[in-house]
Image (spheres, rainbow, N blue to C red):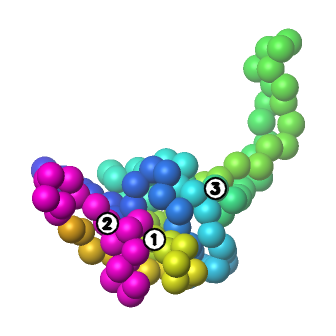
Amino acid sequence: MERKKLHVKTGDIVTVISGQDKGKKGKVLKALPKEGKVIVEGVNVVTKHRRARGPQDQGGIIHQEAPIYSSKVMLFCNNCGTGVRYGVKILADGEKIRYCKKCGETL
């Protein structure tokens, strides 16, 4: 079986490049590599009707983020102010870092 890999990780700041939420920026809350999707804070918010499951649990209409395909997001560079491609450098101590291909800033 082939191992799938995403270009973004949990905690990354990304920008949406296509779809109804194009231009929105948010933090990756969860990465789902098996499905090739990510959940981004404030992006693709859906309405769910939830039934109360006991006397303490509240029912009602809730809003939550749904997964979107990872190909619709790009890593956000604070220096450039846009979504950018990134490269990987290996430092002298063996640590890998990601950097912006446009400006060279560490991501």
Residue closer to the observer: 26 or 6: 26
Three-letter amino acid code of the residue under disc 2: Arg
Residue closer to the observer: 43 or 12: 12
Q: Residue 49 bears which disc, if any?
A: none
Badge 3 is on which residue? 41
For image coordinates 18% across by 61% down, the residue present is: 91
Badge 2 is on which residue? 98
Q: Residue furthest bottom?
A: 102
Three-letter amino acid code of the residue under disc 1: Leu
Q: Residue 75 bears which disc, if any?
A: 1
Q: Which residues are magenta?
A: 90-107
Q: Is residue 105 magenta?
A: yes
Give yes or no for contact between labels 3 and 2 (Cβ–Cβ under 8 Å).
Answer: no
Q: Is residue 97 left or right of residue 20?
A: left
In 3D space, how far apart are the residues under numbered discs 3 and 2 (Cα atoms)?
Answer: 22 Å
What is the quadrant of residue 82 in the picture? bottom right
For image coordinates 24% across by 68% down, the residue present is: 88
For marks 2 and 1, the one nearer the N-term is: 1
